[in-house]
Amino acid sequence: MSEKRTGAQVMCEALIRNGVEVMFGIPGGAIMPFYHAMWEYRDKLRHVLCRHEQGAGHAAEGYARATGRLGVCIGTSGPGATNLVTPIADAMMDSVPLLAITGQVASHVLGKDAFQETDITGITMPITKHNYLVKRAEDLPYVFEEAIYIATTGRPGPVLIDVTKDAQQATIVPDWNIKLDLPGYKPNYRPNLKQVREAIKLILSAKKPLIIAGHGIIMSGAVEELRAFAERTRIPVITTLHGIGAFPEDHPLSIGMPGMHGWVHVNRAIQECDVLFNIGGRFDDRVTGKASTFAPNAKVIHVDIDPSEIGKNVKVTVPIVADARLALQAFLNEFPPDNEAFAELHGHASDWMEHIREMQAKHQPKQQYLNRADTENMSLPPHDVYAALTKALNSRGNYRVVTDVGQHQMWAAQLIDWYRPRTHITSGGAGTMGFAVPAALGVAIAHPNDTVWVICGDGGFQMTNQEMATIVQEGIKNIKIAVINNGYLGMVRQWQELFENKRYSGTPLSGPDFAKLAEAYYWKGITVEHTSQVEAAIEEAYATDGPVLIDFRVEREVNVFPMVPQNKSISEMILESPHRS
Amino acid sequence: MKKHTIVALVQDRPGVLSRVVGLIRRRGYNIESLAVGHSETPGVSRMTIVVEWEDVEQVVKQLYRLIEVLKVSDVTNDPIVEREMALMKLHAPPSKRPEIVALTEVFDAKIVDVGANTMVIEMTGSPAKVQNFVDVIRPYGIKEMMRTGRIAMVRGARGHNAEEYVENANGHAERVPVMN
C-alpha cells in the first residue's frame, strides 16, 4: 500500500518516476509547498535556481534540445508563470519536450483576482501542446503521467501543469496504478508502406532529386538511417537550420543549408529539382521564401509525424505521416534489393551533383570568407571570429554550440562545420532573442564533459545575461560565451540598410563593457578588437578552468549574405550589399 | 470564402470548448454558430461549428492536434439534416394575435407563452426555414430572440458513433525510444 503523501510530494515522485533528474525554476508563494517537498528528494531531483523564469524555461529547453529528454521548468503563479510564456512558445515552435510546472492560488480564490493570480492555462492554451489546471491532489499522479507522455511522444512539445496551492498541500494516498485514457491522441509512428513504395517509385524515376533533412531526423534519432538512405540513393542532402547535425557536412552528399540565408547553390538546386524528399522538416517560410514559387518543378514527398504539417505550406505529391526514423527504415527495407534498379538514378544523381558543385564553386567561397577586398579596412570582420572558432572546435572536438537569434546565428549556421546531431542548438521557429545564455546552462548540465560555446549578439546577450550568476552558483565551468558585438540589433539594421533606405530606427545599441560585466559575475572576461587577437582569446577561454566571456567587437555594419528578401522567391537572392560593386 | 459546417466529437473535459474556439479565433475567423451538447456516449460531446473559412482542410487537421478532439468531419457537402431552434418574444397585443397564430401554424411553430401583450414562440426547423419565419414575424415586433445555432447530422447509415472512438482508446500509442 502506498503511504500518505502531500500533493507536492506526489509531484516530486511523479517526476522521478518519469526519469526527471533536473529542474530549473524560481520559487514563490503559490509554488512554495512544491519547493518544501523537493528538498526531501534533492539527491534524485536537482533543482537549479535561475534568475528569471524566462531563463529557467530556456535552460530547460537547452537541456531537452541537447538530450531529447524532457526539460522541466518551474515558476510560481502570476508573474512567475507569465515569465515562462516566451520559452513555452519557443518550445512549441521548435517541438521541444518541455514540462512547465506553475503554482496557482488556492482553489477557493480562483477567479477572484487573488494576489499573484493569473489565468496561465488560458494564456498558454495556444502555445502548449496541452495544459492542465489541477485543483485536487488526487488528480496529480494521472495528470503528471499524461502530461509527460504527451510532451515527449508524437511531435514533442510543451505541456503546462498549473497546480493550486491547496492541491499541493493536501494529503492523499496516491494511486500510482495509472492507465492513460487518451482516445484523441494516437500519434502515428509507422509509415504506410503503400505510400513508401509510391515514394520509392518517384525517387527512382528522378533526374534531379534532393533530400531536405529537418529537425525530425534529430528528434527521432534517424541520423544513421538518413546516411544509409542518402548513400544508397546518392541524392544530395540539404540540412535545414534545425536539421544541422542530422547529416555531416563533410560528407560528399552534403550540400548545406537552404532558405533565407541559405547558400545560392542550395536554393538554386531546390528551384531546379524534380523530386524533393523532405523528411522531418516543416517547410517553414524561412526555408521556402514565397511558398507558391518554391520548387516549381518538384514532386514533393513529405515525411512528418504531424499530419497538420502535410500540405500546410507546400503541395505534396506523396504524404507520409510517420516517425522519421521508422519511415527511413521502411524505405531501406522496401528499396529494391539490387543496385541494378538504382543504376539509372545514380547516373542522374551524379550529373546533378556535379551541376550543384559547379554552382557552389562559383558562389560559396566569396560569401563564406567575405570578399577580402571589403574587409581590408576592418580591424575585426565577424567572419574571422567564426574561422578561428571553427578551427578550435574541429581540433578540440566535444563541443556544443548554442546560438541566439540574428546575424551571428546565421553566420554560425553558415560558417561552422557541423557533423553531429544536437551540437547546434538554437531558437528557430520563434526566433527568441535571449535564448542562448540560459539555454547553454541547460546544455552544460546535460553534457558536463563538452565545451558549450554560446554565440550571441550584443542585443540578445543583454536580454538574459543574468543567468551568468546561475552558472557560477551551480559551479558550471564548461560554458564559454562569444559575444559578436557590433553595437546594433544587427539583423534589423541589415533589413533597414537593404530595404528601408538606411533609416536605423531603434537599432543602434550600446552596452556595458561586457568583459567587466563578466568579471563582476566572477567569470573571466576578454575583449577582442582585432583579428590578430582572436585565436589567443579562444585559446585562453579553453585554458581557463571556468566560464569565460569573450567580447568580440566586430565590424559594425557587415551583412549576412546570401539573403532572400521576405516573401520573395528563393530564386531572388541578394548576394552582396548594393553599394559595393 | 465559403461557409463550412464542421461536426466534431470531443472529450467532455474542462477547457475543450475554449481550445476549439481558440484555434479558430487564431486565424481571425468569426464563428457564425456553434452548438455543443452531449453525444450518445457518456464523456463525449458533439459540436457543430459553422464558420466562413478558407483552407478548411488545414483547420480540420489542426483541430486533430488538440488532445481532446476525437473526430472532425467537414459535412458541408454531405447530405445532412440541419436544425436550429429560435425562441422569440413578440410584441403581441390582442388585436394582432390572430395573424400571429395563423403564421405560426403555417410555419409549424409553437406558441409556448402568452402574456398580456406578449407571446413567446418556439420555432424549430432547417436554418433557412427558421430564418424565413424570423423575417416574416419581424414586422410584428420582436422584443427578444434567442437562437441555438445549428446542429447537423449526416443522413443514412454514414456518420460516426462516438463509442468507437472511445473504445479504440484502450492501449495508447506506442512509445518509440529516441536514440542519441
Image (spheres, coloured by chain):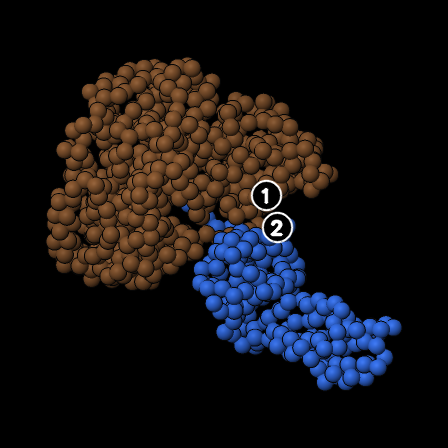
Colour-to-chain, brown: A
Q: Quadrant of residue A138?
A: top right
What residue appears at the point 33 percent right and 35 percent down from the top-left corner? A490
**Which of these two is toward me, A545 or B40?**
A545
Is disc 1 in contact with disc 2, using a CB cutoff of under 8 Å?
yes
Q: Assign a secondary structure to mark 2.
A: loop
Residue drawn at point x = 35 percent, y = 37 percent:
A504
The image position of residue A495, as x and y in percent, is 32, 42
Q: Label 2 is found on which chain of the structure?
A: B
The answer to whether residue A12 is above or below residue A92 is above
Name the residue beneath numbered marker 2: B15
Inspect the image, locate mark 2, and give the three-letter code of the amino acid beneath it.
Gly
Q: Is residue A148 visible?
A: no
Which corner quadrant of the image does residue A35 belong to? top right
Local secondary structure at mark 1? helix
Pointer 2 local density, CA inside 10 Å: few below 14, some 14–19, many at least 20: some
In the picture, residue B45 is in which quadrant?
Answer: bottom right
Q: Position of residue B161 (x, y in %)?
A: 58, 66
**Residue located 22% across and 39% down the image:** A249
Which disc number belongs to residue A121? Answer: 1
Residue at mark 1 to residue at mark 2: CA–CA distance? 9 Å
Chain identifier of the residue bearing label 1 in the image: A
Farthest residue to the right: give it.
B116
Image location of residue A109, percent across then percent down: 72, 38
Residue found at x 26% / y 21%: A529
Say above or below: A527 vs A69. above
The colour of chain B is blue
**At which x and y percent is residue A1?**
66, 34
- Identify the image quadrant of the C terminus of chain B: top left
